[in-house]
Image (cartoon, rainbow, N blue to C red):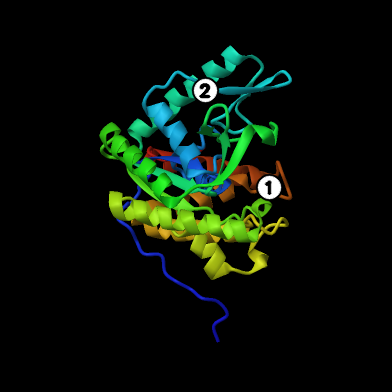
Amino acid sequence: MDFKLSFNVDVNDLKLSHKDRIVTIGSCFSNEMASKLIESGFYCEANTFGTLFHPLSILKVIEASVEDDQNVDYHQREDLHFSWDSAGEVFALKDLELKSKIINLRCKFKHELSTAKLLIVTFGTAWGYVHKELNSIVGNCHKASSNLFDKELFSINEMESEWIILIEKLKLFNPNLKILFTVSPVRHKKDGLIDNNRSKARLIELTHLLVEKTGSHYFPAYELLIDELRDYRFFGEDLVHPNKIAVDYIWNAFKLSSIDKVGQSIIDELLQLKRQINHKSLYADSVADKLRCEKAKKMKATFLENHPEVNWG
């Protein structure tokens, strides 16, 4: 008897190896995947501007970086300065300090993007907040008064047209760059379940249109959690974020579908070695434990000598 619907994630043509650099941007789920990539020995630039959820707010920071935009719109709250295009963890105590920080982050992101083989973009919601005075979508409201914004459920056509233009720019900027889209399986419960589902439906259609029209890739993180795992035992206490079991399951599907066989083998060897090195003995400083630690150090040195492309972290 089957207790769940299962589906196989098709192997794509990315065939990632540890020589390939990866950039992730988007919702908090992209942080989960980036952590797995880094843990598995990849060089990965993760959410340079913090967590961003809306397709057009994600687009804005990518475009500003590639085009060397020097303009920074900011919000001041008491003695803190925030960028309207970045998450709350990106802040400064002075406006000029914030501008310098944002421009440096854009330069860093542009450099990483110029050398990357893969950009992973995770859309979180189609609901966006448009700053009335700036007439522009923000990446984060930074606890500012709701009177400053109009909340809007963006149309698929509006988001699609902007992204197709950006993807063409990225192809010229880095012809070797491939783009993989995912839709975050994290529900935005503050919007309510009905409006969350309206939002996710638009994001799913948007990603598939972009894949069809630009030759990009899609990874079904949303379907793996919402349709295959499905049960609340795979969610955290808030009932919206995937727990460790679910993240590991989705990561394994990504590994099998997008990383080449050699890379998969290296990951297995690397994680096993890390477990040995990080093992906490009941008998610390004993002769046996010292011998174990020394052996593990030699194994690490040999591993890195054989695989210099691996980022130990």
Where does the image place residue 11, in percent across and percent down from the top left?
34, 61
User: Most extreme residue toward the bottom, as rendered?
Assistant: 1
Residue 79 point in image, percent of width and height: 72, 18
Q: Which residue position holds label 1?
A: 280
In the rendered image, the vertical position of residue 10 relative to residue 258, given as above or below: below
- Callout 1 crowding tier (Cα within 10 Å): few <14, some 14–19, many ≥20: few
Q: Does residue 295 appear in the picture of this structure? A: no
* Residue sitting at x 66%, y 54%: 189
Q: Hey, what amino acid is under mark 1?
A: Lys
Secondary structure at badge 1 equals loop
Q: In the figure, is residue 40 to the left or right of 142? A: left
85 or 151: nearer the viewer: 151
Q: Secondary structure at mark 2?
A: helix
- The quadrant in which residue 241 appears is bottom right
Residue 91 in the image: state x and y as whole percent: 62, 24
Amino acid residing under circle 2: Ile
The picture quadrant where one finds residue 121 is top left
> Which quadrant is the N terminus positioned in?
bottom right
Q: CA distance from mark 1 to mark 2?
A: 41 Å
Where residue 214 appears, as percent x and y from the top left, is 29, 49
Rendered residue at 55%/76% (across/down)? 4
Between disc 1 and disc 2, the foreground one is 2
On the image, numbered disc 2 is attached to which residue? 102
On the question of residue 278 being in view, the answer is yes
> Relative to residue 110, is residue 218 depicted above or below?
below
Q: Residue at x 42, y 22 (%)?
A: 69
